């Protein structure tokens, strides 16, 4: 009986200890995520009269935005660009991550990861503006192409420019996350696959990718989230026409101070990202069905 009582007291003490360390995270989430999100949802039901927001609970803003073709055009464009950016970043990053994980020494890998982190030391906006010099019709790329009789090509204010900006934002992070995931794959299993006669390509698809699946999906998820919510690249490199959802939010707030309608767009974005995130994490941590 005494042993059971001591066990119960110890369990309560441990739960209290764990709760003390969890409290800052919970408070941070409530203050900076849950609270603003709830306020944004509430604001989407407000009304604007004479350029002033009035507290209300009406569906006019939702009906107005959902009935407009430009909203759905922006939604599909944003979703499509984010998906394309995720696919491109994943495909480009995988060979580099594979080489860093299996073909170089630990010391070289550490230095390369450090170099991949360095771009984040500077402002993303500054890095985007630097692409003006490179992508302009009189820029570096067109100047090089002119020597072989090609160009000039229009790369600014295009979808290509937007994707270049997305790669600037996401590609280093995807390479880093993929490298960490691939580097943790058990090398003994790879060697066993080779001993059993697996070709290098089959080893990658049958052994390495399934074992690193969680990290690869999480890397792709980060890329999608960052691309979906990015304002800078589609605005400065893509020309903002047609607008993506982040640009549509800015345009909506400038049009008659329609913050509630902008809140509708923001809530739709958050709902989409949360859905994609839960689906991706469910796929990442899904266990293989036993045969």
Image (cartoon, rainbow, N blue to C red):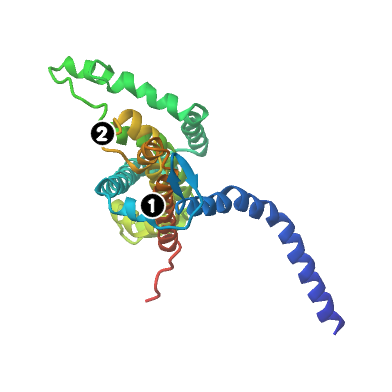
43 on left or right of 280: right
Q: Which mark is residue 61?
A: 1
Quadrant of the image containing the C terminus: bottom left
In the image, what residue occupies the spot 31% across and 21% down?
134
28 on left or right of 144: right
Is residue 97 positioned above or below 280 on the image?
above
Q: Residue furthest left?
A: 149
259 on left or right of 11: left
Q: Residue furthest front?
A: 50
Q: Dot 2: what SS?
A: helix
Residue 208 image offset from top left, x and y in percent: 39, 55
From the viewer's side, name the closer residue of 220 and 65.
65
- Number of marks in picture: 2
Question: Which badge, 1 or 2, comes first in the chain's sequence?
Answer: 1
Pointer 1 with pointer 2, Cβ within 8 A: no
- Mark 1, mark 2: which one is toward the viewer? 1
| Distance between the alpha carbons at the discs numbered 1 and 2 | 33 Å
In the image, what residue occupies the spot 72% across and 60% down?
18
Quadrant of the image containing the N terminus: bottom right
Is residue 113 positioned above or below 86 on the image?
above
Residue 28 image offset from top left, x and y in percent: 63, 49
Residue count near mark 1 (Cα–Cα under 10 Å), binned few <14, some 14–19, many ≥20: many
Q: In terms of image quadrants, where is residue 155? A: top left
Residue count near mark 2 (Cα–Cα under 10 Å), binned few <14, some 14–19, many ≥20: some
Residue 212 image offset from top left, x and y in percent: 43, 55
Q: Dot 1: what SS?
A: helix
Residue 107 image offset from top left, x and y in percent: 52, 35
In the image, what residue occupies the spot 39% across and 27% down?
128
From the viewer's side, name the closer residue of 103 and 112.
112
Instruction: Residue 1: tell me if it is visible.
Output: yes
Q: Which mark is residue 160?
A: 2
């Amino acid at each position: 009986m005494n042993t059971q009582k001591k066990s119960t007291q110890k369990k309560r003490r441990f739960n209290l200890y764990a709760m003390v360390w969890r409290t800052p995270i919970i408070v941070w989430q409530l203050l900076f995520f849950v609270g603003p999100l709830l306020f944004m949802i509430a604001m989407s039901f407000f009304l604007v009269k004479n350029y002033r927001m009035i507290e209300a609970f009406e569906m006019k803003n939702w009906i107005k935005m959902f009935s407009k073709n430009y909203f759905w055009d922006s939604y599909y464009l944003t979703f499509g660009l984010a998906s394309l950016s995720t696919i491109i970043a994943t495909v480009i990053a995988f060979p580099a991550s594979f080489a860093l994980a299996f073909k170089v020494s630990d010391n070289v890998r550490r230095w390369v990861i450090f170099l991949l982190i360095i771009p984040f030391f500077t402002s993303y906006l500054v890095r985007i503006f630097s692409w003006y010099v490179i992508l302009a019709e009189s820029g570096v790329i067109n100047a090089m192409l002119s020597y072989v009789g090609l160009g000039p090509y229009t790369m600014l204010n295009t979808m290509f420019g937007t994707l270049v900006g997305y790669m600037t934002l996401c590609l280093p992070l995807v390479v880093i996350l993929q490298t960490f995931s691939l580097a943790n794959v058990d090398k003994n299993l790879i060697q066993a696959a080779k001993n059993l006669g697996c070709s290098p390509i089959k080893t990658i698809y049958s052994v390495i990718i399934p074992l690193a699946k969680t990290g690869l999906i999480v890397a792709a998820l980060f890329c999608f989230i960052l691309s979906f919510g990015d304002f800078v690249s589609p605005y400065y490199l893509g020309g903002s026409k047609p607008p993506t959802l982040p640009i549509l939010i800015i345009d909506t707030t400038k049009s008659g101070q329609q913050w509630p309608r902008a809140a509708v767009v923001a809530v739709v974005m958050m709902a989409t990202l949360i859905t994609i995130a839960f689906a991706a994490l469910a796929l990442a941590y899904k266990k293989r069905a036993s045969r």
